Image (cartoon, rainbow, N blue to C red):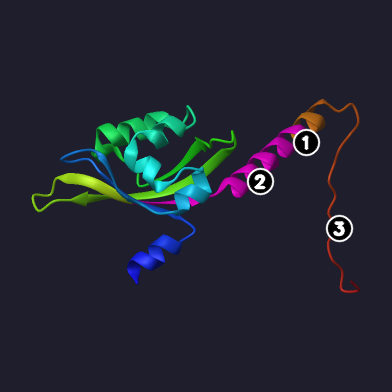
Amino acid sequence: RFRHFVAKASDMIFRYRVSPVRGYDYISPACQHILGVSPEEVYADHTLLLKMAIPESRPSLTSAYANPETVRQHELLGFIRGDGATVWLETSRVPVCDTDGDIVGYDGVGRDVTDRTRAEEALRASEQRFRHLSEHALDVIYRYRLEPTAAC
């Protein structure tokens, strides 16, 4: 039942192994829908997601691959799909330790937040345009708020 649940989840669920040999022990089928690559492609090349990462996300992923102690628990990462679209994943990762307490990998979830990220960027751009307009306008721009009255 657990495997069925994980396989059907819309979020990308994974386990990355750093010891003894680096690679993915599991990555859910959602990676096909979200990133446009199959689990088999990721298993065949454990650095595939690093290669797909946007330049700003690569340092964090490179660090996580090289040194699992540096993995950030929550992070926003960008990837370029094969079709050229940028996909934003909100990731949550936790270390997996052996009986000696050494980190041997990490479990994680990646949620596609592309639409939310685009909306936030559009809002920031709109606010910046309004700020530029209001700072450089030759006319007076003001905001007046009427206090509600008992009649309203």
| Quadrant placement of the N terminus | bottom left
Instruction: Name the residue carrying label 2.
Output: 119
Residue shown at 87%/73% (left/top)?
Answer: 150
Residue at the left extreme of this rendering: 100
> Would you say residue 8 sits in the magenta stretch?
no
The part of the image, by quadrant, that contains residue 147 is bottom right
Q: Amino acid at mark 1?
A: Phe
Where does residue 29 sit, x and y in percent of width and height? 43, 54
Where does residue 11 sit, x and y in percent of width and height? 46, 56
- Which comes sooner in the sequence, label 3 or label 2? 2
**Relative horizontal placement of residue 125, taking residue 149 as reference (left or right):** left
| Quadrant placement of the C terminus | bottom right
- Which comes sooner in the sequence, label 1 or label 2? 2
Where does residue 74 sit, x and y in percent of width and height? 40, 47
- Residue at mark 1 to residue at mark 2: CA–CA distance: 16 Å
Q: Which secondary structure class fits the magenta region best?
A: helix
- Which comes sooner in the sequence, label 3 or label 1? 1
Instruction: Name the residue carrying label 1.
Output: 130
Mark 3 or 1: the one toward you: 1
Q: Amino acid at mark 2?
A: Ala
| Residue nearest the viewer, comparing 82 with 66 | 82
The image's mark for residue 146 is: 3
- Per the image, label 3 sits on a secondary structure element best described as loop
Graded by Cα atoms within 10 Å as few (under 14), some (14 to 19) or many (20 or more), the crowding at tag 2 reads few
Residue shown at 45%/48% (left/top)?
Answer: 31
> Would you say residue 127 sits in the magenta stretch?
yes
| Residue nearest the viewer, comparing 134 with 96 | 96
